[in-house]
Amino acid sequence: MARLLSVNVGLPRDIEWKGRTVHTGIWKHPVLGRCRVGRLNLDGDGQGDLAGHGGEQRAAFVYQIESYRYWQEQLKRTDFVFGQFGENFTIEGLPDDAVCIGDRYQMGGGLFEVTQPRVTCYRVGIRTNEPRMPALLTSSGRPGFYFRVLREGEVGAGDEIVKVGQANEQMTVAEINALLYSPDHARDRLERALRIEALSPGWRASFEALLQNQTTVAGGGNAGLAPAAAAHPTAPGFQPLAVAAIDQESEDVLSLLMRHPDNLPLPPALPGQYVVLRLPQNDGPPLFRSYSLSGPVSTERYRISVKLEPNGVAGTYLRDHVRVGDILDVSSPRGSFILQSGQRPVVLLSAGIGATPVLSMLHVLAAARSTRQVLWLHAARDGQHHPFTTEVHRLMPALAHGRSYVCYSRPGSRDRVGEDFDATGHLSQSVFEEVDIPREADVYLCGPTRFMAEMKAALGAFGVPPEQIHVELFNGSESLTPGVVGAAMRAPHLPEHDANTGPLVSFARSGIAAHWNASTYRSILELAEACDVPVRWSCRTGVCHNCESGLVSGAVVYGPEPLEKPAGGNLLICCSQPALDVVIDL
């Protein structure tokens, strides 16, 4: 007979961890007497990170005393207490390899349904004082599981747990857990899992992604876990390309057209992707810079367009030292800021040099004579600083429902309103209303950091759903550090006491190159954090793949080994170390 041994609750609090402040509800303590369970939570309980825990699908977390005993034996520990794993219900019975998604249980006055295994994160490692715990819980098949509350009521220690229903398709918590995190994603089992109505939407989306990715060859990574930023991996390395033409697009934008020296085909690009250039320096390591492909999609030539900043080292090098016929080291096209297929309206929203990736999208739409609604919105200082005007005007007539709108913040004396630009000022929510942006549109946003933050806020206020706003960041990436609060934003920099020995780790988007020191860092993630390079992570032990990033060049080794390796051309920075000099797309 299964029994409830302890009801555990705890409100979020701030703790110190590795020099950071983490807001977490992982500390749970037993309740004396009975406790009311609501649809979203238990009385007196809370979660610090609602993106990963809590809510209707994860109202209560369950862990078994049998698993406690297993970990006590494995870890040689005797100090575990109820709530040690962050669970709300410590129970006896109902092992993960017997309980199925969709099983229903009566406990006290409440009725509960199993929705998913637990998704482990680094905070359970903090609570158990065992950093490996997120990986251990997942790899052991003992993750625990979440309940949805079907009927609210009171529960208490000693209550009997009675099974009262089950799903038509029976798959255990352990099976579902392994199906996502282990390398075997058998199609028939994915289809079975997707027939379980009680399966939570998050896990359902992961299995749908895996099912759609069944054509990927072995070693293709885990499509159910890979973040959007790692969704289009490509082979690492650089190839020499010859500069075929150099064009001045505006006062401060220079375009370079490149092709293979022997006219061999180039790796195909998707509209919106970029390449990384490796530029030599006389007195230091090479410079790595990412530049969007700004021309039509082609396997014969790549075009990049470079903003010439007053103190920009890379732009100055390209302007002053590169001539037609010169050879540049160029990566294969990369990135997941790409034009989505379908028939939804398209809004291309840019400022300054941010026009480059969306211009590539415009080329593809025009070449296909797309019948989608296409709206080009661009912001520039004036006509002298407005590249690609002739090009955009040439492309627009190919679109049956295409239109453009350009704002100049400080138009020059020769700039003509109604011909060169449409309005003086800045793009804003009022402009969105004036031009009547379709709220159902996919919006592709690129430009300076402040511009993108303002535009995202304006689009949200205007009513465009967040999932329809696609953002490209030239410098760094959007970070994900769940639970970390109050951390000051700092520009990427070299770490303290950077050595002159060891493999060189270059973070291409952040423009930082630092040497690897195995006695200081356990992972590339820790080195990136020491440099304040924007990073994404959750488990920190090779499970969740949130940290999956592009490996532009070089090779890494893993320690510990991830449960499933990323796609070729990507790496997991949380558990990898450089085997030699590496360039990473961060």
Image: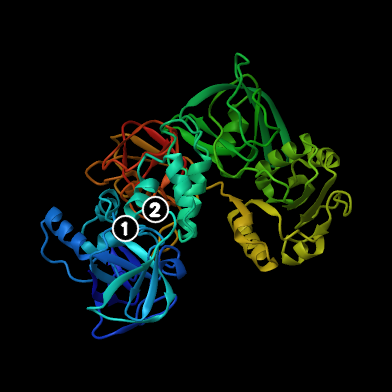
Residue 373 at what x, y percent from top left?
A: 79, 50
Q: Quadrant of the N terminus?
A: bottom left
Dot 2 or dot 1: first in sequence order is 1
Identify which residue is drawn at 23% across, 84% down: 32
Residue 445 image position (x, y, % from top left)? 65, 52
Residue 159 placement, left or right of 399:
left
Q: At label 1, which amino acid type do we have?
A: Tyr
Compared with 99, 262 (above or below) is above
Residue tagged 2: 537
Q: Nearer the viewer, residue 548 or 562?
A: 562
| Display colour scheme | rainbow
Q: Which corner quadrant of the image does residue 556 belong to?
A: top left
Q: Which residue is at a point 39% across and 30% down the rendered structure image?
A: 554
Quadrant of the rendered structure where residue 121 is?
A: bottom left
Instruction: For residue 230, say whether it is visible.
Output: no
Q: Which amino acid does label 2 sit on?
A: Trp
Residue at the far bottom: name it.
Answer: 33
405 in relation to 315, above or below: below
Horizontal arrangement in the rendering, residue 388 relative to residue 175 (left or right) = right
Verify CB contact (< 8 Å) between mark 2 and mark 1: yes
From the viewer's perspective, tell me whether residue 114 is left or right of residue 98: right
C-alpha gap between disc 2 and disc 1: 9 Å
384, above or below 283, in the image: below
Q: Mark 1 points at which residue?
A: 122
SS at circle 1: helix
Element on which disc 2 rests = loop
Q: How crowded is mark 2: few (under 14 residues within 10 Å), some or many (20 or more)?
A: many
Q: 91 or 196, which lies in front?
A: 196
